[in-house]
Image (tube, grey):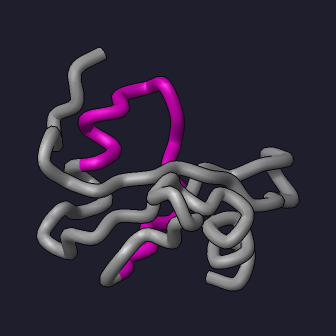
Amino acid sequence: MQSQFPTEKIAATSRPDAKWGDAVVIAITNPDITLAKLQSALGEIAHISTVLYLSELPTIGIGKIDREQLKKMAREA
């Protein structure tokens, strides 16, 4: 699937949810991309529960997304 936001830095993770077990959390660096735009891009694949607007996505030394840090940030949001 081709991204509708090809130049944006976006990452997905989850956090515990009482109703669903896990809830989808999207982290993005562009505050102009709204929850509605993101949800429209995903369609019915997943329901986004939260959007984290960050100045930078957390990364590990080699530039890959730090998934553990991102998950921690999602739980605290």
Residue 30, placed above or below residue 65: below
- Taking the view exactly as shown, the residue that stands out farthest to the front is 62
Question: Where, quadrant-wise, is the C terminus in this rendering?
Answer: bottom right
Q: Is residue 7 magenta?
A: no
The residue drawn where x is 16% and y is 34% is: 4
The residue drawn where x is 13% and y is 48% is: 7
**Image mark count:** 0
Q: Is residue 44 magenta?
A: yes
Region of the chain picked out in magenta, as a range: 38-54
Residue 72, placed above or below residue 65: below
Residue 27, placed above or below residue 23: below
The residue drawn where x is 73% and y is 63% is: 68
Q: Position of residue 3 (x, y in %)?
A: 22, 30
Q: Position of residue 16 (x, y in %)?
A: 82, 60
Front-most of 15 and 47?
15
The residue drawn where x is 30% and y is 15% is: 1
Q: Position of residue 15 (x, y in %)?
A: 74, 60
Front-most of 38 and 62?
62
In-image side of 48 versus 37 (left or right): right
In-image side of 58 versus 1 (left or right): right
Front-most of 77 and 58?
58
Q: Quadrant of residue 20?
A: top right
- Taking the view exactly as shown, the residue that stands out farthest to the top is 1
Residue 17, placed above or below residue 75: above
Q: Position of residue 64 (x, y in %)?
A: 50, 53
